[in-house]
């Protein structure tokens, strides 16, 4: 996954050594927030430029950019042509790369093998139990409990959700037909949480 900053404008006020120090505000994806916190703090020490960024999810960042509340937005997915048509000209700037992964919390199970189709069926609510025969066949050396699987997903518009669901459309015809890819998807079962930190907290 490549995370991009979408930028439309910038402004400045204070001076620093003969140049104006810039003050930029941004919002969007929670995935790169720890990275941005470090980078923007170090950047401020160079020429006094200040960059404030709020991790509110890609969808929220794009809306704020459209509404001219922020100077830039962080998004795990590129803006669509429709989104760009609703705002000033946008420049996409790749900033960092990372992976979207499936995490689980299951006592006593340190390693679990999954396939793309199985993951799709779990998030579609078709595989409901940890000891489902398909999971057991993939993990013959693991003792899987007779407990319900509770998928956790983002409640807010999310580029991470887009990356994840776009992958599922490529490995599961069922997912492509019933759910598709997007920043927000109607997951049929599980628990929603706000932001990647919220999902991690629930897990």
Image (spheres, helix red, strand yellow):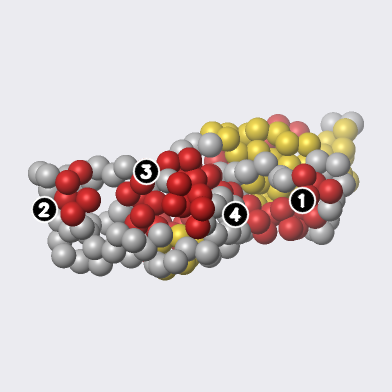
Q: Is residue 45 visible?
A: no
Between disc 4 and disc 1, whose residue precedes? 1
Helix, strand or loop at mark 3: helix
Q: Is residue 113 left or right of residue 167?
A: left
Tag 4 residue: 183
Between disc 4 and disc 3, whose residue precedes? 3
Considering depth in this image, is 177 or 151 the residue closer to the camera?
Answer: 177
Labels 3, 1: front one: 3
Residue at the image position 43 percent from the left and 41 percent from the top: 171
Q: Are marks 4 and 3 in contact (CB under 8 Å)?
A: no
| Above or below 66: residue 97 | above
Between disc 2 and disc 4, whose residue precedes? 2
Tag 1 residue: 83
Helix, strand or loop at mark 4: loop
Percent of width and height locating residue 133: 18, 54
Q: Are marks 3 and 1 in contact (CB under 8 Å)?
A: no
Considering depth in this image, is 24 or 167 the residue closer to the camera?
Answer: 167
The CA span between labels 3 and 2 is 21 Å
Labels 4, 3: front one: 3
The CA span between labels 4 and 3 is 19 Å
Label 3, residues with CA under 10 Å away: few <14, some 14-19, many ≥20: some
The CA span between labels 4 and 1 is 13 Å
Between disc 2 and disc 1, whose residue precedes? 1
Residue at the image position 78 percent from the left and 50 percent from the top: 82
Tag 2 residue: 143
| Above or below 130: residue 4 | above
């Amino acid at each position: 996954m490549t995370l991009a900053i979408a930028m439309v404008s910038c402004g400045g006020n204070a001076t620093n050594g003969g140049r104006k120090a810039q003050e930029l505000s941004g919002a969007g994806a929670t995935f790169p927030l720890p990275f941005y916190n470090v980078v923007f703090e170090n950047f401020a020490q160079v020429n006094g430029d200040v960059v404030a960024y709020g991790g509110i999810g890609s969808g929220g960042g794009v809306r704020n950019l459209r509404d001219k509340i922020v100077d830039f937005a962080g998004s795990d997915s590129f803006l669509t042509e429709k989104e760009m048509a609703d705002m000033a000209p946008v420049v996409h700037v790749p900033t960092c790369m990372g992976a979207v992964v499936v995490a689980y919390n299951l006592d006593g199970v340190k390693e679990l093998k999954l396939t793309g189709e199985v993951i799709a069926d779990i998030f579609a609510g078709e595989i409901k139990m940890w000891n489902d025969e398909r999971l057991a066949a993939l993990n013959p050396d693991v003792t899987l409990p007779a407990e319900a699987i509770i998928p956790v997903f983002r409640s807010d518009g999310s580029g991470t959700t887009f990356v994840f669901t776009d992958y599922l459309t490529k490995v599961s015809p069922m997912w492509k037909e019933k759910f598709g890819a997007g920043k927000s998807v109607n997951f049929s079962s599980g628990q929603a949480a706000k932001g990647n930190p919220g999902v991690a907290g629930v897990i």
